[in-house]
Each structure stands twice: as C-alpha cells, then as structure tokens.
Image: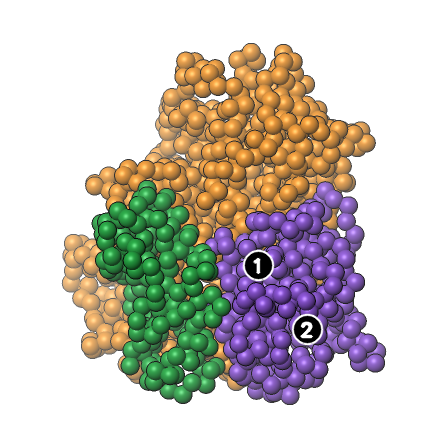
C-alpha cells in the first residue's frame, strides 16, 4: 500500500522541518518539505497530500507576533485550499510555531471551518522570556483528537518558545473547548497533577498545551513531539528505565495509520 | 501620509515585557518605579487611507484577544497616576527587522497602496509617585535605549 | 584613474612619515608606518597615487583581524628562567612554530582541512565531515551587547555555511566573560554599560539569533571578573555537518561573482580595523550593527540546496572586510573584476569604497560557472533570497574594481595578499610573585567559618553558580539530535560537563563539544593557564564518553595590547603550551583565532582584560548510546577519585574568596593525564561507569556537591582513604577539598563493576574514597576520620542556583 503523503510546510524562518520530516518517515509516512511559495504558485498541490504539518520555527522571525504573518498567508492566500484540506478530515498538525499559526489563522479552535474572529491566542510567556525545558503532559481522557488516540501515559516532551501562553477569548470559549473534547494536552508536574511554573512553563490558562478542532483532525500543540522519537532524546535516559520508543513518535504514527485507513 | 500606530496590552492581560523591564529598573538601583507598561509603536509612511490602515492594524499588527490599538493617538494608560513616558526608536540606517516584516505582511493582505517605510519603536510608561525626569533619563540611557543604535525621548506625562 | 565626486585620489607618494601616519589615522586604516611605506613604495613603482578604494582594500586585507600579523610576525622574545637569568631568542611566526606545528607533526589522517578555510574540518562518518570554528566579537558587544553578540554568532554561523562548499550548522557553543553582576553602579565610568546590562544584552542577542536560525546551543561557560568590566569577551562557536565531497573550493577564471543575501549598507564599516583599536568613549560606532537572522536562515537553506546540485565552485562569507575580503579570498589565485555599482544597496548615496568594505550582515559570495546561473537564480528566487551578479573571476591575477564603467581600483593579488610587511615585535616574560595567604588571613576564612560554609560561598560565586537562567533561554533541542544536554540529572538541573549530539538522525554516530577556560591561572602563568584549559576541555569531553583518540582542538587567544612586551610575552608562553599539550595528548588544533587589544583607555589609564585562553574541543564518537552523565545514580554505588591532588590553590576559587591569587598554579603532567584519559575513556565505553564529573573550579568539594545534588542523592567521602600529594597533611584538609589540580575526575561505579573498573584503571592514580548515600546529605570525613563537612544537598543546590536566578 502507498504510504500517506505528508506535506511539511516551510517558509522563511521555519526550522523544525527536517526533524518533523524524520518523524513522519519513522512513522511510515512519505513526507516532503514544501515551501509556501510553491503552494501559492500551484494551488492544486496541497490537495494531493494526505497529511499537513506546520513545523516549529520562527516564521518571518515572529516579528510583530509569533506566527502572525504565516497565519495571514494561510488565511488570505491559501484560505480555500487549507479549509478544504481540513474540512475533508485529513490530519493537520501545527507544532509550536505551527500551533501559533493554526490558532492565528482561525483553524483552531475551528468552531467554523475558519473562524473569522480569533477565538483564542498564544501570547508571551508569563516569565517574559524564552523557555527551553522538558515538561510533563497529561492527555485528556475525553478528547477527540485522532493524533493522540490511545495514548494514556503521561508524556515527557520538550518545549522551546517565548510565546506559548494559551488564552481563550472568553470563558465561553474555554467551556466549549472542554465540552467538545477539544482540550488535548495539559501541562502537569511529574506526578500528573496540574501545577504552576515551571511545570506550566508559560502560564497557559488551565495549563492547556494543545487543542484540536471539534472534528479531531486538526491538532496544535506547543511542545515538540518530533524531538522525542527515541529514548536517547529523553533528558534522563542515562538514569531511568525507558522504552526504546520516544514519547512523541506515537503521535505521528497515529496520523499515518489514520490516513492509511481513510485511503482504503 | 505618515501614520503612528500604538499597540498596547488590554487591562486584564499581563504585560510581560513591562514586568521584566520593571525588574531591570530595580536592578539599576532605582526603586521609585512601581509599574511599567510597554507599548509597541509603528510609524508607517504609506499611501493608504485611514480605513486601510485600520484594516492593517486589525489583521496584522495586533492580537485582538490581548491587545488594543489606536491610530494617531496614544493608547490608554492610567493617566491619572503619576508617570513619565519614554520612547525608544532605532536610529536611521539600523536594521529594523520588524519594520521590514510589516511590509511583507501587508503585501499578503492585498491592501492596495504603497507602503514606503515602516519604523518601529517602543514606548514605556513608567509609573511612580516620586519618579523624577532625571531618573527616567538614567533609566532610558542605561537600560531602555542604547545610544549607539537607538534614540530616545522623554515626555513628562503626569508628574507627582 | 581619475578623481570624481565618488572616488578620491590620496596623495601618498609625496608624504613623509608623519603624513603617512596622519592618513592612516584619519581614515581609520589601522596601518602602521612600515605598512604605509610599503604601500607608498608600491604606488611609487606604479607611478601613481592610490584611490581611497585601493587604500581601504589594503587596510582591510592587511588588518590584524584578517592577517594575524602579530602571531605570524617576528617576535624578539626574552624570558627569565627560574634562577633569575635572562634568555633571548627570535621567533619567526609563532603560530607556525607552535599551534600549527603540533598539527603538522601529529599528521593525523582524520584532519581533513586545517588552518586554511573558514573553519577546521575533521572526518566524521563514511560520507560526512564536521567543521568547527569559534571566534570572538568583543568590541561590538561592549558597545551594543544585543547587536554585537547577535552579529557575532551570525558571523561564525556564516563561517560554517561558507567553509568548503558549505556546511549545515548543527550546534552552537557560547562562552562569555563579564564583569561581576553586582558591580556597584557608581564604581564604573558613565561611558560604559553595567556588566549585568551587558550580560543580559549578550544573552538576548545570542538567544534571538541562535534560536531563530534553528541551531541548538548545547554548551558554554560564563566567567565573571572585574577585569572584564570594560572589555567583556563574547566567544561564539558553531559546528557544521557537510558531505566530505564538499570540503574544498576551486574557483576558475570566468566564474561569476554572485552576491547572495542581505543588501549592503553603511553598517559595520571599518569593523576589521576597529577590532585592532583600543576602545575609549569616543570610539567610532558605525562598526556596530543589528542582524536579521531570518535572512541568514533563508540564505543557508537555499545555499545548501544549490550546493547539493553542484551549482557553484566556491563560496565564502562576507565577514570582516565585507566584499573586499570575500572576493579577495575567492579570487586570490586567479583574479577578479567587480562592478561596485551592481551591488544591491540598502539606500542610495554610498561611495564605492563604502560598498566594497561594508560589513553588512547576512551576505555570502559565490563563484558560479556562467552555465549554472539560471538554475542557481531559480533556487534563490523561489525562496525570496536576493542574489546579484556583481562581477567575474579572471585570470589576470589582479583585483579590478569598477564603478559606473570607471576603474576605481587595480591591485595585484600577490601584493594584496602577500605584500604586508612582517611585524617585528618585542616580547618579554617573567614570573611575578603574588601574595600568599597569611595564616591569620586564612584562619579568618577557614577558622571562623566551617568548610561547609566555604563550599557554599564558592558554589555561590557567579563563575561557579548555575547558569540555568541563561541556558533555558537557548533552544538546545532543535534539530532533534540532542543526546547529552547542558543540564542533566534527576530534575534536569545539574551542570553537564559537555554536550553530545547526533547531527544525522539516521545514524548513532555523534560528537561531543566541550570548552576549557580559566583566566585566573593566567595571572600567574599563561603557560599553565593554557595547559589547564586544554586539560579541562579534554576532561569535560572524556566525562560524557568522548573519545580522546578522535579529538580536535580550537584556540582563542584574547589578550591586551601586544605592543606591550609583557602582553606578547604571555602570548608566547600560551602558544608554547598549546604545542606541548597538543603533542602530548595527540589532539591537534584545527583552527583558531586571536583577539588582541582588549583594552579600554579611561582617563589616561589603559585597562586590560585578564589574558584569556579559551580552548574548545570536539570529539567524534561512533555510538552516542554509550554516553554517560555527571549526576549520581544509585545509593550504595562507589565513588572513586581519579588523578593526583597537589597543593595547587594558585588562581583558585578558594583564594579568590580571600581576595588573593597565590602562586601555586595547577600544572599538568601531560603523559600521566593522557594515559588516565585513555583508560577512563575505555572504562566508560565498556559501560563500567555510572557517572563521571571533572574537578575544576572549587576542586573536589564542588564536584562532589554538584554530582550529589544533580542526582538528588547524598554522598560520603573519606579523605583518609585517598592519597594526597600535599606535604603538610595536618594543615590541609582545606587544600585537599579546594585544590584545583588538573586531570582529576570523580567517578561513580556500581559495586558489581568494582573489579572490572579497577582492572580497567590499573596503573592509574585511583582511590576509592566514598559512596553514594540515600540520605541526601554531602558528608566529608577528614584525615582523622571525623566528619568535617556535612551539608544537605537541597541547601547546597539552592546556594548554587540563587546567584544567577535573574
């Protein structure tokens, strides 16, 4: 059977594209890194892929606000293509800067195919500085996200961002996210309990680290699953008993498996 | 036309930059500042009408959830409290990456009309009962601006 | 050549000495009289005067920054021997006689390209090589810390992107020297920035550039000392990965000169000559710039794409000297013609000489065969990278510059590159006697305070204290290859000795990067400072599982004004240590840099930095899964001390607490050290070692404390079980705990591996001196068996973390 084709979107300042490509390859996908200019020039290209990934980095330097300029390009230049891709149920993931892009482009929370009005945002960390550290994540039990299907354990992943504080527009949005099963990942301490800084590295509301759209195919998260693909990425592999597989790998496998089934 | 746009944080949102600047001011040995508010300023020289500039602000320059903006007038701050304003700008010829990105970002929005230049700066509102302009001068010189690449000006807001 | 409103002819043929020097000064050329006279002779022979473009080109190419005139010049050196008599000798090219000589004599097959390109290149895997370069960006960082440090890191990254036919940057390492963060504001001149402001600015500059480039910053060090208040040191290093087939350039006549990346502006004019001028408050500042990392990222992405399609034959970065040095280097053996008016500018109104030597950031120059031009332009255009043909390489052996069809410079390549007259400088070295602690003074510290309190004081010194506040602002995981991280242990906050990465995610091969630096030893003797720095860099690397047999070194000399005989004398001592150590350890130098004139003139006085030698090391390892960390792992495990402890407190943190330098600088027995490192490397490779940490600042006590709190376990040490090379045993439990003797490690071994470990270490200096405890205290029993230090590890850790928790 053909491997699902994964489009890894690049633009000026993208810098986690290689390891994201590697992650999908390990997950038996067929990834390709594609520059946004190519998608704009050939608009039919996007639809030929099965999975879309917007990797981490500093698109356009994150000048003005993180992810903003790339989000506008998706919204105004490729709006139709992106909307079609997401609404036909194909898996979409935004990691770190990619999450910021998905939120600012209105694809997340995605109450409508593209939210006209911003429903949530990711803004400066409470600590006012870039935070690179390994954190623990609880996968919410009732989430609908296809990317985290079957994952029950506490995840250990690194974060590395200056603007990762998740804020919903208002209480109603937060309630909706919870009731819809759209809250996917929350920062916790080592025991899986919610805790303050540095367990919650940015001050996110309700420790939210990742959300999905109501359908569960579009997923955004601040932590980097592509940086924990083997146990040798783990910060304590020299002192703890760990499985060979890194905590992030299953996320990519889930999407590839889903696409394979969908194609059948 | 030259437009001056100010972008600040809404009241209920933590101004992380302001907070960290406040901490640095205390490190300078000046204890008279109680709070700092940071405001991003864009000076845009463009052949655009007001509605177009407003669109640029909404769609590109601000985060509607955390920030508010005003064109050609200062964003609100607690003007009733004693404060001093310090504005910091890059000198001419110094790389202004954010300014360049605004031009790129505006192109994506398909706003008709040429943007000739974008200059970015930061305004700091220094609150403090007994803060003097001299102290504000020291803060500007030693912390907020580096005379090598930046200019600053100090505006007495409301003095105690 | 005629004078126009864009080009001036400078009359030098008729000038006397004073006139020549005035021209050099007025135009910030930083050329001395001999050099000006050489230029004068050249133009007298040509029968004409130079244009400003020609003079500027010569000044840039001949700058200390580009040519290392001092270290490659002639040095008349005299030194005082131990018996007080003086010896004299003449050294012809110090670098060639020491640093480079060691590499040449070792002649190791895995050194693929050394001392000729932008960076040193060593063999890595079957298909790939690694390039490594560390350099400084000191003066700009003093004036504008954020921009200075950012352009520093941007520059060294470009060196890597421009080595051979281009390497992919995979790791950054940064080392800083600052004034003490608690320096009182009113104690320093108003003309400089406060050390903490500089530190924060530098960290932010490196953070914003490195993070945006997507390069993990995995290793570094920060030293604080008052001598760096006026002249901070900012070292930026980058490792690059490249296919072996791309390690050399071959520019041919007819290739086009393609300028790629950022536009040219007035920023950074005179950067190369500026770095050789002493700072003062009037220093001209156009040399400082702010970079744009996203432009550099785009250039890197597209350039490597073009490389993989073999579309160009040469590449180098525009660093110091801008186009002048980039085109000059690429065209050195053939010749080049450049049309200055074709270079894309940030704004109009620049003069030809300004365009030619501007140091605007994020620019690269390529040599492109004409038939490949369309294809390479397609690659750059597709990702919005500006690229412009500005000239062509020729077979004329001349550098020809034109502006609007007018010739504005014609220089022979030979004269440009080899015409610089050799410096002849005097150097002198003598040993100075420093004050030793008097019994009363020492007892004031040691007597009134317990050893535990002294340990805590040392742990809280900014140089020793945790750098977590800095480290967490750097992305150390991007690219996904991080194996041993800068912070490690039970809760990821212990200080790693070195970092390990695997740059190719489909292979388990990797490399270790480490640094060694301790300028305080140089106050006593730069020879032993350098030997210690090399030993420390190697120790750090061995600690995580680096392979001493596959390790290469980089040097970075940072000194004061070399016109002062004693400054240059120190450089000679340091360079000789490089040779001796590299030969003995069989670790070749592959590249290096020097930054001289780190002085600041204040009210007529010249304030110099402590002479500082940074040694950076890189080691290739075949399987990163065999690496280990420094945090102790399990209670009941055994603790061994490897290496000999002497009463070597000179330059130590302990004497620094007393406000003293002392004389007993740590020395190195190279042969013994090499043998120990080799045995330990083997033991680690066999999986016999649970954790390993080197002894450096603060000695045994600090190393034990760090291992304990990193592992969140206690440790017990019995000094009576060790053997100490200290004459007066009674006196000196303090010396045993805080001596900074080199070539030592604390090692944790599981009891089940005891036999095998001791066998592996046979013939080495090994002492089983303690064990891991469950109770979370650090306990030291003295020579008489009594407990002389007992501290709980949480308290030690808090002390160590608090200082730099900004």
Q: For the residues marked 2 and 1, what is the alpha-carbon distance in whole angstroms?
A: 19 Å
**Residue at horizontal 56%, vertical 31%?**
C796
| In-front residue for pair A21/A140 | A140
Colour of chain A, in one word, is purple
Asked whether residue C225 appears in the rendered view, the answer is yes
Q: Chain of mark 1?
A: A
Colour of chain C, in one word, is orange
Q: Is residue C386 above or below residue C56?
A: below
Q: Chain of mark 2?
A: A
Q: Which chain is green?
A: B
The image quadrant where one finds the N terminus of chain C is bottom left
Q: Residues within 10 Å of mark 1 (few under 14, many from 20)?
A: some
Horizontally, residue A239 falls left or right of residue B103, namely right
| In-front residue for pair C136/C634 | C634
| In-front residue for pair C65/C728 | C728
The image quadrant where one finds the C terminus of chain C is top left
| Residue indicated by mark 2 | A214
Can you tell which mark lies on residue C167?
none
Can you tell which mark lies on residue A205?
1
Horizontally, residue C325 falls left or right of residue C502, namely left
Coordinates of residue A251 in the picture (x, y in percent): 73, 64
Q: Are marks 2 and 1 on the same chain?
A: yes
Asked whether residue A55 appears in the rendered view, the answer is no
Coordinates of residue C356 in the picture (x, y in percent): 34, 70
Q: Quadrant of residue A109?
A: bottom right
**Residue at horizontal 57%, vertical 45%?**
C514
Q: Residues within 10 Å of mark 2 (few under 14, many from 20)?
A: many
């Amino acid at each position: 059977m053909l491997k699902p084709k994964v489009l890894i979107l690049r633009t000026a300042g993208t810098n986690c594209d290689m390891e994201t490509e590697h992650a999908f390859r390990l997950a038996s996908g067929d990834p390709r890194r594609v520059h946004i200019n190519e998608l704009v020039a050939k608009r039919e290209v996007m639809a030929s892929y099965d999975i879309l990934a917007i990797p981490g980095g500093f698109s356009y330097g994150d000048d003005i606000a993180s992810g903003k300029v790339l989000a506008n390009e998706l919204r105004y230049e490729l709006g139709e293509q992106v909307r079609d891709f997401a609404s036909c149920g194909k898996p979409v993931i935004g990691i770190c800067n990619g999450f910021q892009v998905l939120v600012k482009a209105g694809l997340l929370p995605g109450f409508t195919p593209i939210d006209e009005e911003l429903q949530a945002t990711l803004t400066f960390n409470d600590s006012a500085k870039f935070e690179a550290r390994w954190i623990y994540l609880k996968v919410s039990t009732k989430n609908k996200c296809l990317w985290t299907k079957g994952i029950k354990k506490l995840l250990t992943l690194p974060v590395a961002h200056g603007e990762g504080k998740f804020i919903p527009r208002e209480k109603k949005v937060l309630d909706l996210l919870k009731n819809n099963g759209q809250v996917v990942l929350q920062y916790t301490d080592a025991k899986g309990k919610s805790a303050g800084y540095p367990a919650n590295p940015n001050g996110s509301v309700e420790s939210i680290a990742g959300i999905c759209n109501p359908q569960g195919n579009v997923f955004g998260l601040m932590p980097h699953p592509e940086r924990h693909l083997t146990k040798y990425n783990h910060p304590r592999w020299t002192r703890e008993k760990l499985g060979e597989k890194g905590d992030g790998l299953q996320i990519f496998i889930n999407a590839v498996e889903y696409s394979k089934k969908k194609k059948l | 036309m030259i437009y001056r746009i100010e972008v600040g944080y809404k009241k209920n949102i933590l101004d992380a930059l302001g907070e960290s600047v406040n901490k640095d001011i205390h490190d300078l040995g000046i204890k008279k500042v109680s709070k700092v508010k940071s405001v991003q300023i864009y000076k845009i020289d463009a052949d655009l009408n007001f509605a177009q500039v407003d669109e640029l602000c909404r769609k590109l320059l601000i985060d509607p959830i955390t920030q508010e903006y005003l064109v050609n007038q200062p964003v609100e701050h607690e003007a009733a409290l004693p404060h001093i304003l310090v504005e910091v700008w890059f000198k001419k010829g110094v790389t202004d990456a954010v300014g360049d990105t605004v031009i790129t970002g505006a192109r994506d929005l398909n706003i008709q009309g040429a943007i000739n230049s974008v200059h970015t700066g930061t305004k700091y509102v220094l609150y403090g009962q007994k803060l003097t302009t001299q102290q504000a001068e020291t803060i500007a010189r030693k912390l907020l601006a580096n005379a090598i690449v930046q200019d600053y000006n100090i505006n007495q807001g409301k003095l105690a | 050549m005629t004078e126009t409103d864009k080009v001036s002819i400078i009359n030098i043929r008729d000038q006397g000495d004073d006139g020549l020097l005035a021209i050099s000064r007025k135009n910030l050329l930083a050329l001395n009289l001999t050099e000006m006279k050489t230029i004068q002779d050249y133009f007298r022979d040509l029968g004409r005067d130079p244009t400003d473009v020609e003079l500027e080109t010569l000044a840039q190419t001949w700058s200390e920054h580009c040519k290392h005139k001092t270290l490659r010049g002639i040095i008349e050196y005299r030194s005082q021997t131990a018996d007080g008599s003086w010896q004299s000798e003449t050294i012809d090219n110090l670098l060639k006689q020491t640093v480079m000589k060691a590499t040449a004599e070792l002649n190791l097959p895995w050194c693929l390209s050394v001392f000729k390109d932008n960076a040193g290149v060593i063999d890595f895997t079957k298909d790939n090589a690694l390039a490594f370069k560390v350099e400084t960006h000191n003066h700009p960082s003093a004036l504008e810390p954020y921009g200075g440090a950012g352009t520093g890191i941007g520059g060294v990254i470009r060196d890597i992107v421009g080595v051979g036919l281009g390497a992919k940057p995979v790791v950054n390492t940064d080392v800083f020297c600052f004034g003490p963060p608690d320096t009182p504001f009113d104690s320093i001149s108003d003309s400089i920035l406060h050390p903490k402001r500089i530190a924060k600015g530098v960290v932010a500059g490196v953070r914003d550039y490195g993070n945006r480039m997507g390069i993990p910053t995995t290793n570094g060090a920060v030293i604080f000392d008052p001598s760096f208040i006026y002249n901070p040191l900012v070292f930026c290093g980058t490792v690059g990965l490249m296919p072996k087939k791309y390690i050399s350039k071959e520019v041919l006549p007819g290739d086009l000169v393609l300028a790629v990346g950022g536009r040219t502006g007035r920023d950074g004019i005179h950067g190369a000559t500026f770095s050789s001028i002493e700072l003062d408050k009037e220093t001209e500042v156009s040399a400082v710039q702010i970079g744009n990392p996203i432009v550099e990222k785009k250039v890197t992405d597209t350039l490597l794409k073009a490389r993989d399609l073999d579309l160009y034959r040469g590449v180098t970065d525009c660093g110091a000297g801008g186009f002048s040095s980039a085109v000059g280097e690429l065209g050195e053996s053939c010749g080049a013609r450049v049309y200055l008016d074709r270079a894309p500018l940030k704004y109009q109104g620049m003069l030809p000489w300004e365009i030619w030597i501007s140091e605007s950031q994020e620019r690269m120059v390529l040599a492109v065969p004409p038939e490949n031009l369309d294809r390479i332009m397609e690659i750059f255009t597709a990702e919005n990278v500006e690229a412009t043909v500005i000239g062509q390489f020729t077979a004329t052996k001349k550098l020809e510059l034109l502006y609007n069809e007018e010739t504005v410079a014609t220089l022979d390549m030979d004269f440009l590159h080899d015409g610089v007259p050799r410096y002849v400088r005097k150097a002198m070295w003598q040993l100075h006697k420093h004050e030793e602690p008097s019994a009363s003074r020492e007892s004031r510290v040691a007597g009134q305070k317990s050893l535990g309190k002294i340990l805590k004081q040392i742990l809280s010194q900014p140089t020793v204290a945790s750098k977590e506040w800095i480290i967490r602002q750097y992305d150390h995981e991007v690219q996904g290859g991080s194996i041993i991280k800068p912070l490690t242990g039970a809760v990821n906050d212990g200080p790693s000795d070195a970092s390990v990465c695997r740059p190719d995610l489909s292979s388990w091969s990797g490399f270790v990067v480490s640094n060694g630096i301790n300028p305080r030893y140089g106050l006593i003797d730069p020879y032993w400072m350098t030997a210690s720095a090399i030993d420390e860099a190697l120790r750090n690397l061995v600690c995580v599982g680096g392979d001493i047999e596959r390790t290469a070194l980089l040097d970075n000399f940072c000194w004061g004004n070399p016109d002062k005989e004693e400054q240059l004398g120190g450089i000679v001592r340091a360079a000789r240590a490089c040779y001796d150590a590299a030969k003995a350890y069989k670790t070749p130098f592959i590249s290096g840099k020097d930054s001289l004139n780190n002085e600041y003139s204040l009210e007529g006085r010249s304030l110099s930095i402590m002479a500082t030698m940074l040694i950076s090391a890189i080691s290739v390892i075949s399987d990163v899964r065999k690496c280990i960390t420094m945090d102790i792992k399990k209670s009941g495990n055994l603790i061994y001390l490897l290496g000999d402890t002497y009463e070597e407190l000179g330059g130590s943190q302990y004497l620094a607490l007393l406000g003293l330098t002392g004389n007993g600088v740590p020395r190195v027995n190279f042969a013994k050290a090499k043998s120990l490192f080799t045995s330990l490397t083997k033991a680690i490779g066999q999986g016999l070692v649970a954790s390993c940490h080197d002894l450096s600042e603060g000695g045994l006590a600090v190393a034990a404390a760090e291992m304990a709190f990193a592992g969140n376990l206690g440790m017990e040490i019995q000094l009576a079980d060790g053997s100490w090379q200290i004459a007066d045993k009674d006196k000196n439990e303090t010396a045993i705990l805080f001596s900074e003797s080199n070539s030592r490690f604390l090692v944790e071994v599981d009891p089940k591996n005891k036999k095998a470990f001791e066998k592996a270490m046979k013939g080495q200096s090994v002492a089983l001196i303690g064990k891991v405890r469950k109770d979370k205290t650090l306990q030291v029993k003295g020579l008489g068996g009594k407990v002389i230090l007992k501290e709980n590890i949480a308290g030690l850790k808090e002390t160590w973390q608090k200082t730099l928790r900004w």
